[in-house]
Image (cartoon, coloured by chain):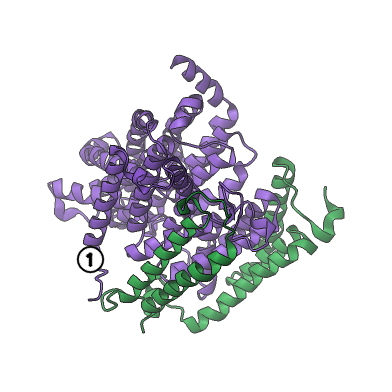
Chain colours: A purple, B green
Amino acid sequence: MIDNLNEAFSLFLSFENIAIVFVGVLIGTIVGAIPGMTTPMGVALALPFTFTMQPVTGILLLIGIYKGGLYGGSITAILIKAPGTPAASCTVLDGYPLTQKGEARKALDIALYASIFADFMSNLALIMLAGLLAGFALKFGPPEFFTLIVFSLTIIAGVSGDNLIKGIISAALGLMLATIGLDSIYGTNRLIFDNWQLMGGLNFIPVLIGLFALPEIIHYFTKNASGRVHKAVMSGAGAGMKEFKQCFKSIFRGSLIGVVLGAIPGIGGAPAAFLSYSEARRNSKNPENFGKGELEGVAAAEAGNNGVAGATLIPLLALGVPGDVITAVILGAFMIHGLRPGPLMFVENLPMIYALFIGIMLSSAYLFIIGKFSIKAISRISEVPNSILYPIVVVLCLYGTFAINNSSFDVLVMLIMGILGYFMMIFKFPAAPFLIAFILGPLLEDNFRQSMVLSEGSLNILIRSPICWFFWSLTAISVFLLIKSKQKNIPLAG
Amino acid sequence: MTLNRLVGVFFLVFGALSYFILIPQGIVVPSNIQHFTTSPAFWPNIITVIIAIMGLLLVLQNSDVEDINTEDIEEELEDHTSWKTRTPRLLIILSMLFAFYFTIEKFGMVAPAMLLILILMLFAGYRRWSLILLFSILVPTALYFFFTHVANIPIPLGIFETLRG
């Protein structure tokens, strides 16, 4: 343990790593604060820049952006009623009324304190639980992993959009795309159609950038041009210890909600923020003030939202299963560096895991520094019009995609995925299940086929152990609950 | 037929065509496979069946409650640009992006990227020429220097290769 920690510190302690976490949180906060940008977009665009970095450095940059993005989304939510991220839409409910009352500074401060506290709690949960879960997962064989991935994909497909059927189609398309390339067992061609560039399969970065950056941009350019820019106005006195103590119960509760929901694949920040907010209102002495500028409402929403950040890394690091798009990108970053998160990583590469934990803890401190001292400047950056921002982002997408393999074919893949993503957006197909299924597809198929090889073709192996039964039961329960909860929206004819 | 059902029909047909044509044509199945579940085509077949079934369910879905129509789409996209305006703009933006792709080989990435930023900023309605020129030149050049000299990834310059510094 001590040896591993020593090794982790020597792995982490470099100027490059200490600085990169700061840069990541700063970029994330800025990206989150710009209404036209999303955190997945920011992480996707940063990914090509990590190719030449050390694995720890590159991954910490992405985690920093993720954490900064979660908080950054609240800045414009509070100041101009434009949530930078879906999760921050809950912060708008009380944040913007506080700005209207001239108490923007107080709202921003309490959002920052709640975010940092929740982030810290989430990091602790990650550090304490990931190792335990990974130890348990060491008992998993191919059938157990197969059932785990089926469960994860079901819940991600179900909760990502309004419609379970569309979520499943989206995931199935992602799985289909992942089958392109040489077959992993027999080495025969699959859906290559004599195009040698497809032999290695599709690279995930063009798919990622195409799905998560281009559709927003294409959509922007297809609208009538609008140069409307909101001016962010910072007003009033800040919040201090008194306000933090006042809101502490809601912050603590929200952090726990964030941690629990964050650890379940597919749930994400927005439901955690709304659940934390509604719990804070239910337990408040002044529930009637919620929605009219209640400081506790901002604190609860931000605690719920940021509580997921560390926790989403639990299934990623311990099981190798990403819970959302950003952790899927981080999984991709691991893979680019030839690493595979999961239980074996805790055995073979523990110092690296500890080094990541150190960086993750540091990110909470940086979030405080950035939030406290640069919020004014960041809120100014958020005023940059999309007519300047998007053309630059397009070029970033093109350069970043090309840089993966020095291949213009990847640029073509990205453009095609961008068109697909645009039409998925139009027809309300969630993109997250597509990407996560695309990344998990090979793992799902390999574990299935390994199981079949082990059992000489008998499907009974997929129910061989209590762990398999556990995941099949979870899958059945989640499908049942998803159908039930969405029955009002998607009743079947007949 | 509603748009949602049309989308369902599309996926039903796509699933069926993939199962009966795309997979048999595109996946080479060796003759020595031990069991059909280990065949390279087994998993893609399962996926296409799922797509077809989900397409069918989308067709059967009660469209009175949840359906997409163009008004919904516009509301979802939070603007009210009509599809009459949107379609030509969509074609223009896609043409520009694909034109960039096709020029990479001849002109490299830097010069077309400069032109692309300039055109896109104008297309988005931005009119401050000083900033347009500044960003058009600065961004592709800075990215070129980063990728080429920091990340050691040579960004192609096409016919401008002699300028490589």
**Residue shown at the point (51%, 82%) measured from the top left:** B85
* Number of marks: 1
The relative height of residue A14 versus residue B165 in the rendered view (above or below) is above
Q: Nearer the viewer, residue B26 or A153?
A: B26
Image quarter of residue B15: bottom left
* Place of residue A288 in the rendered image (x, y in percent of width and height, measured from the top left): 15, 55
Q: Nearer the viewer, residue A183 or A391?
A: A183
Left of A94 or right of it: where is B159?
A: right
* Quadrant containing the N terminus of chain A in the rendered view: top left
**Residue shown at the point (33%, 33%) measured from the top left:** A125
- In the orientation shown, which residue stands out farthest toward the top? A2
Left of B146 or right of it: where is A472?
A: left
Does any portion of residue A137 appear in the rendered image? yes
- In the orientation shown, which residue stands out farthest toward the left? A285
Disc 1: which chain?
A
Q: Nearer the viewer, residue A474 or A338?
A: A474
**Residue shown at the point (48%, 19%) measured from the top left:** A4
Q: Nearer the viewer, residue A342 or A21?
A: A342
**Residue shown at the point (48%, 70%) measured from the top left:** A423
* Quadrant containing the C terminus of chain A in the rendered view: bottom left
The relative height of residue B7 versus residue A229 in the rendered view (above or below) is below
Image quarter of residue A391: bottom right
Q: Secondary structure at mark 1?
A: loop
* Place of residue B40 in the rendered image (x, y in percent of width and height, measured from the top left): 53, 54
Does any portion of residue A378 appear in the rendered image? no
Amino acid residing under circle 1: Gln
* Place of residue A202 in the rendered image (x, y in percent of width and height, measured from the top left): 59, 55
The relative height of residue A22 versus residue A387 in the rendered view (above or below) is above
Image quarter of residue B3: bottom left
- Residue bearing mark 1: A487
